Each structure stands twice: as C-alpha cells, then as structure tokens.
Amino acid sequence: MNLHFIEDESGDVIDQFEFCSDFCHRDYVGENYAGWNGCNESEFGTTCQNCGSRIPGECSDDGESGQTVNLVPLA
C-alpha cells in the first residue's frame, strides 16, 4: 500500500490517504506528490483513494487472521 500524509501548518501528520499503487498515488495528488511511500501494511483492508480497488490487510475484515502476526505483550 502507498501512503500520502496530510500535514498541518507545523508539519504534524493529521490524516493520510491510502493507494493501491504508486501510479494511483501520483495520479490522485498530482503536483503534491512528495515521492514514493509504498510497501506499507495495514492490519485491516482498505480502499484505494484514487481507483476504489480493495487493498487487503494483514487480517481480513471479519477478524480472521490472514497472516501470522507476532505480538509482544507490554507488561
């Protein structure tokens, strides 16, 4: 998944758009394209901001594990 971060005046990230490919990322943001930000993963699936394609996550939308995830408890 490719990400495009939305920043406020001070440079803090306040939102993000998800894209299925770098092509969709470039096509959607145009001149605001700040470079490649791909190879990101998400726990759950989402939809491409540009073309509407489904982007699968590590776990399916119904909570079933689609991939083994190792979690370390913080205790």
Image (cartoon, helix red, strand yellow):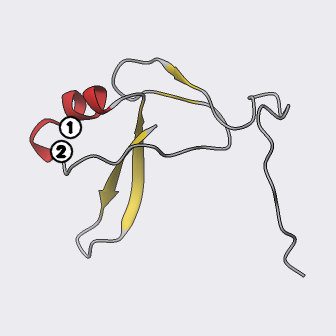
Which SS class for mark 1? helix
Provide residue 43's location: percent of width, then percent of height: 67, 43
Residue under circle 2?
Answer: 33
Quadrant assignment, res 23: top left
- The disc at residue 29 is 1
Q: Which residue appears at 81% of the width and 28% of the height?
A: 62
Mark 2–mark 1 Cα distance, whole angstroms, equals 6 Å
Quarter of the image containing the C terminus?
Answer: bottom right
Quadrant assignment, res 52: top left
Q: Position of 63 compared to 37: left or right?
A: right
Q: Nearer the viewer, residue 28 or 2?
A: 2
Q: Position of 43 compared to 15: left or right?
A: right
Q: Position of 64 compared to 61: left or right?
A: right
Q: Nearer the viewer, residue 43 or 39?
A: 39
Q: Nearer the viewer, residue 14 or 5?
A: 5
Q: Amino acid at mark 2?
A: Tyr
- Closer mark to the observer between disc 2 and disc 1: 2
* Label 2: few (<14), some (14–19) or many (≥20) C-alpha neighbours in 10 Å: some
